[in-house]
């Protein structure tokens, strides 16, 4: 599933292509949207801004209308120069917005809806989201408050994936953040101190911000950290049964939480 850094990067690219540029054509090829009349409802409306909160992307149009997207496991946003070949089949396009210079395409989007700004503000799903780890001002106290309201017996790794506690973290950054903070992701929330919980997000947030600048390319090896000549991509994620890059203990992996998302951790470095 694309994580918050990927969605924030997509929002930047979509915004750069649409804001200030006339949309000359809108298509909704996916059958479920054929009767929604989005091309008619959006005709002549300019895009005022594009933003993201956690894993949710919003395209805001004049007249209080907003396109809301959540990509889940399969979706993707693409921005292409007119005439450029798309990286996915046109049959997988759910939404196409064309300017004179760009095609902006949403592929395979399981959550794609056109809503009013009023509905967006009062949507219970969106209102339940925690503070965005990539928000301009990350609210540490709101994060701790949500975390302490959660099930105290829940593993911290599982709790970090709950978007109601903190928005934008996914399986990669959860595993990497716990490693960088030296916290065992299986430790119950009740046994994780406030300072340890904050260390996880404080270590993760700048790396995710750097990933946005790199175009969503995840590299969690921190600048200046001693290591091999060529920086690896991750510390533990995807490295089950391989030696830890720091202590050479074998990295372990196992499904965690109700969704059984694979968690990676080093038993030697994380307590």
Image (spheres, rainbow, N blue to C red):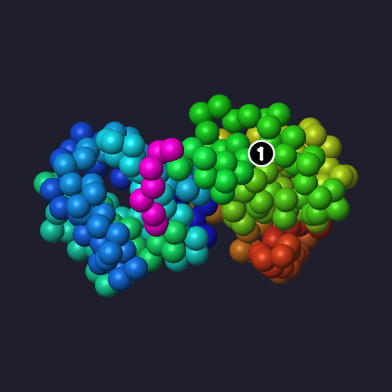
Q: Circle 1 sits on which residue?
A: 201
Q: Is residue 194 above or below residue 27?
A: above
Is residue 117 covered in magenta? yes
Are there few (<14), some (14-19), or many (20+) residues within 10 Å of tag 1? Answer: many
**Depicted 203 relative to depicted 246: above or below:** above
Viewer-proximal residue, 150 or 215? 150
In this rendering, the count of numbered labels is 1
Q: Main secondary structure of the magenta part?
A: strand
Residue 96 located left or right of residue 115: left
How far across and down, in percent of the image, does residue 215 sit? 40, 46
Report the magenta residues as a range: 112-118
Q: Position of residue 100 (x, y in %)?
A: 11, 46
In percent of the image, x 69 and y 49: which residue is there?
Answer: 160
Nearer to me, 118 or 10 = 118
Q: Name the residue: 66% across, 57% down.
A: 236
Using residue 215 as the reference point, say whether residue 159 is left or right of it: right
Residue 6 percent across, percent down from the top left: 45, 49
Question: Tag 1's secondary structure?
Answer: helix
Residue 251 seen:
no
* Picture quadrant where residue 172 is located: bottom right
Kindly tell me whether residue 136 is visible in this rendering. yes
**What residue is at 79 percent from the left and 33 percent from the top?**
195
Residue found at x 29% / y 39%: 61
Relative vertical location of residue 261 with respect to residue 169 in this rendering, above or below: below
Looking at the image, the residue that sits furthest to the right is: 191
Q: Quadrant of residue 71?
A: bottom left
Is residue 111 in the magenta section?
A: no
- Residue 13 in picture, x, y percent from top left: 32, 44
- Side of 113 relative to 259 (left or right): left
């Amino acid at each position: 599933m694309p994580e918050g850094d990927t969605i924030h990067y997509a929002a930047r690219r979509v915004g750069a292509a649409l804001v200030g540029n006339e949309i000359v054509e809108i298509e909704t090829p996916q059958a479920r949207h054929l009767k929604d009349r989005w091309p008619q409802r959006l005709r002549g409306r300019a895009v005022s801004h594009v933003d993201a909160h956690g894993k949710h992307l919003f395209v805001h149009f004049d007249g209080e209308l907003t396109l809301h997207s959540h990509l889940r496991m399969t979706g993707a946003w693409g921005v292409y120069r007119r005439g450029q070949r798309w990286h996915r089949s046109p049959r997988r396009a759910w939404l196409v917005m064309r300017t004179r210079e760009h095609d902006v395409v949403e592929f395979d989007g399981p959550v794609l809806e056109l809503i009013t700004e009023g509905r967006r503000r009062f949507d219970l799903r969106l209102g339940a989201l925690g503070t965005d780890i990539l928000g301009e001002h990350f609210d540490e106290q709101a994060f701790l408050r949500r975390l302490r309201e959660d099930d105290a017996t829940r593993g911290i790794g599982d709790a970090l994936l709950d978007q109601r506690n903190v928005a934008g973290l996914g399986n990669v950054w959860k595993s990497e953040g716990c490693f960088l903070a030296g916290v065992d992701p299986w430790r119950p929330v009740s046994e994780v101190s406030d300072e340890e919980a904050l260390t996880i997000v404080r270590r993760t947030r700048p790396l995710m911000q750097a990933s946005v600048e790199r175009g969503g390319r995840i590299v969690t090896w921190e600048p200046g950290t001693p290591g091999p000549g060529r920086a690896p991509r991750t510390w533990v994620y995807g490295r089950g049964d391989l030696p830890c890059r720091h202590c050479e203990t074998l990295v372990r992996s196992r499904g965690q939480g109700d969704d059984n998302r694979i968690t990676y951790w080093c038993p030697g470095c994380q307590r």
